[in-house]
Amino acid sequence: MEENVGDVRGLAFRGGGDAEIESRESDIASEARGDGSTARRSRSTEMGDDKDELVSAGKLPVDENPVSAYLAGLAESSRRPMRTNLETVARLVSGSRASAMELAWWRLRYQHTMLIRSTLAEAYAPATANLILSAMRGVLKACFRLGYMSADDHQRAADVPPVRGSRLPPGRSIERGELYDLFRACYEDHKKARGARDAAIFALLYVCGLRRSEVVDLDLSDYDPDGLGVRVRGKGNKERMVYAEGGADRAVNAWVSLRGEEEGALLLPVNKGGRIIHERTDADGETHPARMSDQAIYDVVKRRQKEAGVKKLSPHDFRKTFVGDLLDAIGDLSAAQQLAGHADPGTTARYDRRGERAKRKAASHLHVPFFDENG
């Protein structure tokens, strides 16, 4: 293993003075924002020309790669987004020449990780930048545990401060009339199974405040039609209990009556002919229980949004509306936090609309004189 590790030098940060680094940081930040013009500039500004030096990790067996080791320790629902975050770092470091699995992470040093941090701070919102840094730290720890980095090198490289600042929560609240139109679009669907399933999805997203990954992970056995409880597996493999109250049980029960009592995913794909799909056949001819994907939930929301004629919205907007409406109704931050599955009460508090209404009311007491052109 030593021969694979020892001959990797400099990654994409070798050589160059301060001016060159500043130019490169600007280019990398633009690339992170999606500025297509940087693809041309990056070729002239990469630190290091030997591609083999950047992709030496590709020589490692998959089970000895620090990226694989890090991802294996995450919950299944977290692996894909964190892998995407690692690809972002790999792209920035290598000038898009190495993937996360190919990058020689063990060669990162403090000056490299600080440059990565400053680039992310400029290109992303603080929460997003810190999530990407968390993924990077996780791989660096895996490098140490696999013996590719010394304790000192690991500690120094990982010792980068978080990006400071905050942003308002993304998305918007869904108005009561919009909810009505969305559910009506489901119930008016001439394909009864698809309409019932989509109504059940909206009920779970709104009344239970679920993330879309949590919705697709639900099994039929997670729903208790008598007690109205829904057992949810959330982030960090933590289970919580939420409740299909307020008519959500009627929507879910209507779907289950069509779905049947067969074990498996609570929510299932419905084909173009309106038939419920319980099993899928893979390329090898083997059958597997069917289950909707995160993307399928997103597609359902977008389709119904267009049919209902409401403003643009996303699955997360149901969750944001859930927390805001819940706090309006009960004013109990702790209960809202537990139902939403937030580890930090501060995250729940960001969705509290009461403070915004108070600020708006206060601002309404201030007036400026206005004169139109007619005097």
Image (spheres, helix red, strand yellow):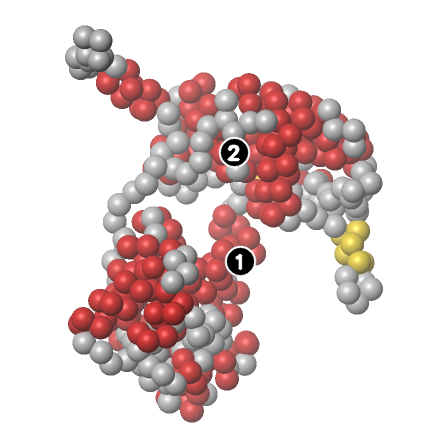
Mark in the foreground, 1 or 2: 2
Tell me where residue 357 appears, x and y as whole percent. Answer: 33, 20
Vertical comparison of 249 with 90: above or below: above
Callout 1: SS: helix
Quarter in which the C terminus is drawn:
top left
Identified by mark 2, the residue type is: Lys
Q: Quadrant of residue 272?
A: top right
Identified by mark 1, the residue type is: Arg
In percent of the image, x 45 and y 18: which residue is there? Answer: 329
Residue on which the image places disc 2: 312
Tell me where residue 347 appears, x and y as whole percent. Answer: 37, 38
In percent of the image, x 53 and y 19: which residue is there? Answer: 176
Neighbour tally class for label 2: few under 14, some 14-19, many 20 plus, Cα within 10 Å: few
In percent of the image, x 45 and y 65: which residue is there? Answer: 87
Neighbour tally class for label 1: few under 14, some 14-19, many 20 plus, Cα within 10 Å: few
* Residue lying at the far front of the rendered structure: 374
Quarter in which the N terminus is drawn:
bottom left
Nearest the eye: 200 or 331: 200
Tell me where residue 99 appears, x and y as whole percent. Answer: 47, 71
In the picture, the disc for residue 160 is none
Q: Quadrant of residue 97?
A: bottom left
Nearest the eye: 180 or 267: 180
Callout 2: SS: loop
Residue on which the image places disc 1: 80
Whichever of labels 1 and 2 marks the residue nearer the N terminus, that label is: 1
